[in-house]
Amino acid sequence: MLYPELFKQLESVRWDMDKDIPWDSFDASLLSQEQAQTIKMNAITEWAALPATEMFLRDNRGDSDFSAFMSIWFFEEQKHSLVLMEYLRRFQPELVPTEEELHEVRFEFEPAPALETLMLHFCGEIRLNHWYRRASEWHTEPVIKHIYTQLSQDEARHGGAYLRYMKRAIGKFGDEARAAFSKVGVLMASAKRTAQALHPTNLHVNKALFPRDTIQSRLPNPEWLEHWLSEQIKFDATWETKVVERILHNMSLLMNQSFQTVQELNRFRKEQMRKLGPAADAQAA
């Protein structure tokens, strides 16, 4: 089991919201109303770890090890929402999300293949690590800069934990896991070709609720994410390239071969699909 080891590792670096956040360093002159609004949106988005955890537990009912790890992931992701709300409570109390706004992002995700979902969230952690690093650079107020740095480091550690479960899955399922991971890897590393940000909170997950079946669509301002990325933290092509490089680097480690481009990873994906035969081709179609 991976859970006991991951528990010890993450417990050893876990930060304390009272002791490890420099609340006394707050400088009101360095926080704009525009910046404070983005903190509210991030707090609500992080709250979506709740329905994501419900999905993980449902779709991994046969995997008690991974399900136990969800206790760590869920705790730390909800803590992200909590620390952002605590920041607002202290310094911009009128912007603290209401319980209704938080509950709006809790809805049922349709069942999906567990391996593909695992890879999707692994890539999501990589992307969020980079988004939060950029957010820390964009903000000018020192306390929130520190918070975003802390959150970005947590997301990197979560990605590392997911990678451990992906390695385990390859040992268990072989080509099936390789095909699932490479399929989603190609998708998540191809954000330059899409009109929207590729992250789990921005993907459609319940046809019955379409078009309000993404986390972002249920925020008080559904257009917030794209504006935050393009106009505020300016997550440009240079930063997007960093995300793609990290995905390809980790896929290279996972598959024991080098992927320098998305095209190379896509060729590998096609090879894995051929190995799995007609059934896999039909599923891909």
Image (cartoon, rainbow, N blue to C red):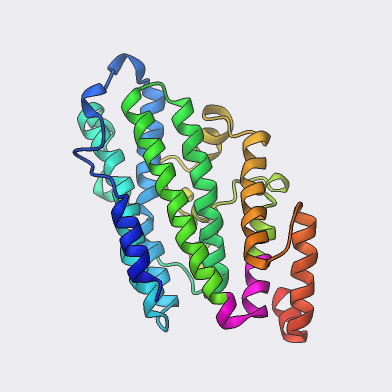
Is residue 113 visible to us here?
A: no
Seen at 45% across and 67% down, the residue is 109
State yes or no: residue 59 in magenta: no
Compared to residue 63, the image places residue 157 above or below, namely above
Decide which of 169, 233 is in the foreground and name it: 169
Left or right, residue 89 beside residue 74: left
Q: Residue at x 77, y 67 (%)?
A: 268
Image position, residue 112 (x, y; %): 53, 73
- Compared with 259, 58 (above or below) is below
Residue lying furthest top: 29
* Res 10 → quadrant: bottom left
Q: Identify the residue shown where x is 34% and y is 30%.
A: 144
Q: Residue at x 72, y 74 (%)?
A: 284
Stretch of the chain drawn in magenta: 170-182
On the picture, is 148 further left or further right than 265? left
| Residue 210 position (above or below residue 40) | below
Tell me where residue 106 sits by quadrant: bottom left
How many numbered markers are drawn? 0
Is 177 covered by the magenta stretch?
yes
